[in-house]
Image (spheres, coloured by chain):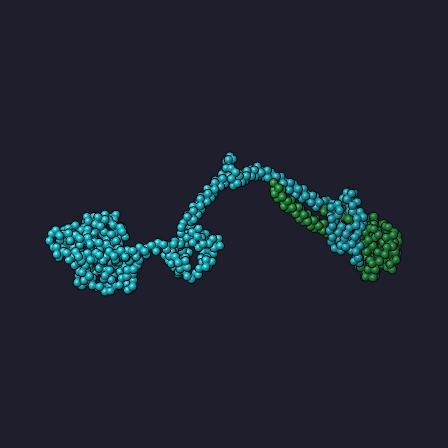
Amino acid sequence: MSFLIIGEIPLLALALLTYFLNGHVLLERESQHLNASLSDLQAFMEDKRFELEKILKDYALWTEDYNAVSEKNGAWLEENIFCWVPEHFGIDFVVLWDKSGSLLGFAGTPSLSDSQTWNYPLEKALRESQFVSGFERLGSSAVLFASGPILKRDSADPPAGVLLFAQKLKPESFPLLEPRTPSPSF
Amino acid sequence: MIEGKVALAGNRGTPEELKEIEGLDIPLKDNYSFVTLHSGALLASRPIYNPEGKNIGYLAICDFSGNVSEARRSAIIFSIVVGAGFLLLVLLASGLLQRWLLVPLNALNQDVHRLVSGKREAERKWPQDQIGALAESLVKLYRESQEARQKAEADSIWFRGIIESSQDILAIFDREGKLVDANKAAEAFFSTSKKQFLGLEPEEVLKRLNIDPKTISFRFWEGLKEAYFTGKETVYEGYFSAMDRQMLISFLPLSLGNELKGVILTLKDITPLRRLEIERRTLVEAVAHDLGSPITSLLAAVELMKKEYNSPPSAGYLSGMENNLLVLRNLVHNLVNFNRLEAGMIKVEPVPTDLCRLLKKVYSMFQPLARSRNLNFTLDCPPDLPSLRVDPVRLEEACSNLISNSLKYTPPGGLVLVRAEKINSSLRLTFQDTGYGIPPEEQDFVFQRFRQGKMGKGAGGSGLGLFITKSLVELMGGTIELASAKDRGTIVTLSFPLNQQISDSGS
């Protein structure tokens, strides 16, 4: 009788071995699954960045805008930039600098306009007339931003100033990931 | 590896789940990383860089759905269920085995133990299944093995009894030529115990007995080899100089099927027998010599008296005396010849012999007797017969014996014919008579010593004549054949090859 019970031990060992091997394989597969979800999430965020950059370019490469910034036409800027853009495009933060890098105006959280965080896009726009977009960290928050020089649409004139749009990343920012991404965090 | 605090939680998951990752220290790597949280949730992360290339945080996905945990839990449950199932099956199988196999086997085992220990015969009633059949077979096998063992023991006792009761010296060697047993006669003969010789080869045994193996005759070692290598029995008589004994030595191979198991060496001490034989021969020689002289004298006296008393009835009496004296002389002569033949003392000296001349001489010797018995006695010998290389004295003796027999056992008026002829490369001598013949049942032993047919006993012969004749003929390289029919006569044929080579000292 006892030898039969002893004979059970290898069977149990086999079951445990199967369990651990299966667990390992399952973890591997779950890791691959989450990695793919991360790729989806990154692709989605890239889309959002292109979308924001596209909106920004519409306003930065606009002759009227160029003229308003050059002339420091506050009324025009207030109406067409600082009020219109946050309201119609859901952008949390808009900043405008002149060609010397001095703040012309902003919409949204005031403290964000003084951040040293924007030195890099500001310099890129003023010195190299380049558009910069991506993610930045502002305190405990993360933002998606796009910035670029304010130019006439078909002119090679130096930039009249620099325009920056930023969107704070919120849980609601990731509605499209629901089917695949269980719970993204940032 | 970097440890980061969760800055922003996504929009899925229960509050408890989100609470778990709020402020959680997550081990993060510069590239993709994957960790299992305490709750079993899985977290995958990738670094995020700003346009300047600086790491500003990590993008992470946390899986609270519990796919893996669930799978693990399922695997555990599955393993437990399967294991429990197996255990149940094992227990069930154990129970069945216990009931159907182990219990009967244990009972069988107990019975076998009882049988082997001889406590009692198995009386259990076994079921009519395989176990029962096995039990019956085992009990049967045991009984048969017991019977075989008892038989083997009985055989062993018989064998031991035969060996020990033998007055001959017996030594048994195994297949490797080592001594495995010897009887008491051997121990007595060599005045030692066999124990110190067991496992030794014959040569070693002899050395332990302080006998130089070189003093043992060549035939001994040849006989031993013959037994071992050809499986043939060898018997010979030899002189055992170390013990001053005459021995009859035999090597008997013991084989089982074609496999040699060993060899039994038998030494029979025939020294007293041989001494007795020598004494007997000496006595016979002496008696024959002592009888021969008076018989010769008596024959001479009768011969003289026959000349003086040649009228009846004295002449008849004298003839009777002469015949009886001749018979007596012949008897003594045969005894001497037999004695010498047995001792190997008769030698043949072959020389080219004119056979016809020899036969005529014998014929003329017996012609008076044939005439007196009113027999038609004829000799047929062609003159161109080639000479034969034989001992003429011994051949004359053999022919005399045969003619004498023919004349003796042929009634008056009968025919006795002696013929010599060359047939192919041999010479044939035929002694034919029309006498009483020899019955078939007597023909087989007429050439044996001291054996006589009914007629011979009536005639007062010694029973040695034909034995001596046959021995002499064979000593000269010839053969003898007999054909006879009751009341129709007898034909004895001697054949000698013409080109035979017989050594001058052959005996």
The answer to whether residue A17 is above or below residue A64 is above
Q: Which chain is cyan?
A: B
In the rendered image of this protein, which colour is used for chain A? Answer: green
Q: Nearer the viewer, residue A73 or B4?
A: B4
Q: Which x, y percent locates residue B189? A: 42, 54
Left or right position of B341 against B187: left
Name the residue at the left extreme: B311
Q: Residue at x 13, y 53 (%)?
A: B315
> Taking B273 as reference, is B364 left or right?
left
Snapshot quadrant of residue B92: top right
Q: Percent position (x, y) of residue B98?
A: 58, 38
Residue at 70% over, 46% down: B68
Judging depth in this view, the residue of B439 and B328 nearest the camera is: B328
> Who is closer to the viewer here, B215 or B273?
B273
Location of the C terminus of chain B (image quadrant): bottom left
Inspect this view and state whether residue B299 appears: yes
Quarter of image, res B221: bottom left
Q: Position of residue B339 (x, y in %)?
A: 28, 56
| Residue B505 percent across, percent down from the top left | 29, 63
In the picture shown, does residue A6 fall above or below A97? above
User: Which one is in front, A23 or A63?
Assistant: A23
Answer left or right for B79 relative to B407: right
* Residue B137 visible: no
Residue B302 vs B68, above or below: the answer is below
Which image quadrant: the N terminus of chain B?
A: bottom right
Image check: B373 left or right of A42?
left
Tally of numbered tags = 0
For the point 40% across and 59% down, which residue is it? Answer: B241
